[in-house]
Amino acid sequence: MTHAPTAHESIPLARPYLDEREEELVLEVLRSGRLSLGPTIERFEELVADRTGARYAAAVSSGTAGLHMLCRVAEVGPGDEVITSTYSFAASANCFIFEGGTPVFADVDARTLNMDPAAVEAAITERTKAIVAVDIFGYPCELDELRAIAERHGLALIEDSAQALGAEYRGVPVGGHGVSAIFGFYPNKQIATGEGGVVVTHDEETWRLLVSMRNQGRSYDGGGGWFHHVRVGFNYRWTDLQAAVGVAQLEKLDRLLELRAAAARRYSDLLRDVAGVETLVADDEDHKRSWFVYVVELAPEVDRARVMGELRERGVATAEYIPCIHLQPYMRERYGFREGQFPVAEDASRRTLALPFFPQIETRDQERVVDVLRAALR
């Protein structure tokens, strides 16, 4: 397991939690000779399905790949509009742009930073095909309201839960509510496999399509072999080496989530008396966050760039979390988006930043982070 930084080292923004179990399972795969399309992937998929309560799981090369294929399943195409949150990672929109869909953004709730269902419904037109909901920073979106809107208007609903493995909505794990969802496994996520993702679904036909599309559109039904392609597909396959890391991570997921939650509580306690800083919304009976990153919102009068510069100068990593998608250069150039269209999201985006956060972060390092932040705010 990697060591925590000393007082003289910089504190990274994120760090995966790995130990001998990952090494053991990776070596097993190497010695087996089954590096791809093997039993370790199937084992990983079974564990994810059991954990989330979904009937089916399909491991893929990234969460983005999973979102893309769900948009293909939803038959998004040129001329179709898809509504998503602008306060998210670019993949939440790229996934349907790949298919020729047009991005339509909805503003967020200032408290949760997830899409405001009223804003979603107001954005629907006769061209709307689907909604991509986002569980930002591991906090569950208002899924029941969004599902009701989708059903009322005959729209597909996809849940981008890339940041939310282990979260719960109304007492049920995210991914277990019947809406097809994806999770991601980049090294800063709740479980880290380097790269990778998984789609969970309760629909057998969707699962069959995903398994085929991730593997170049192959189908083994009816005796079809390796060169039997029944549809256009992608190389979105994952490897058994990555799945081995994933299995080891899932075996200790409860511990990882506990460590993340404990680190979040320590930050919240340490920041309680720091003027000019607001922490993320707390859990309630309907929403249980799975801690992905630790983000704070600075007061409007605070110069975020200056604060971040001082943090970095003193060895504390930080990042803007998270820029609005609609203000990314390609979005401005291609679709004509501009400032002022989504004021709540834009305000949050100007004022939020991430602090160092990972399962094994030590209390002394969190104290140092907060001390440096407090000094930078003076």
Image (tube, helix red, strand yellow):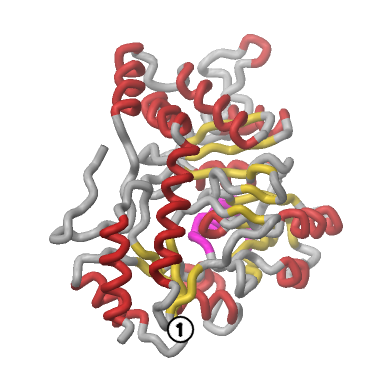
Question: Residue 144 appears in which quarter of the rendering?
Answer: bottom right
Q: Amino acid at mark 1?
A: Ala
Image location (x, y in percent) of residue 145: 77, 59
- In the rendered image, residue 253 lying in the magenta stretch gets the answer no
Write the residue at 72% across / 28% down.
204
Image location (x, y in percent) of residue 1: 26, 37
Q: Tell me: residue 176, above or below residue 88.
A: above
- In the rendered image, residue 100 lying in the magenta stretch gets the answer yes
Image location (x, y in percent) of residue 124: 76, 67
Q: Tell me: residue 205, above or below residue 28.
A: below
Front in this rendered view, residue 205 or 311: 311
How busy is the neighbourhood of tag 1: few (under 14 within 10 Å), some, or many (20 plus)? Answer: some
For the record, the magenta segment spans 88-102
Q: Is any atom of residue 211 visible in this view?
A: yes
- Label 1, on which residue? 299
Image location (x, y in percent) of residue 308: 30, 75
Question: Which quadrant does the C terminus fall into?
Answer: bottom left
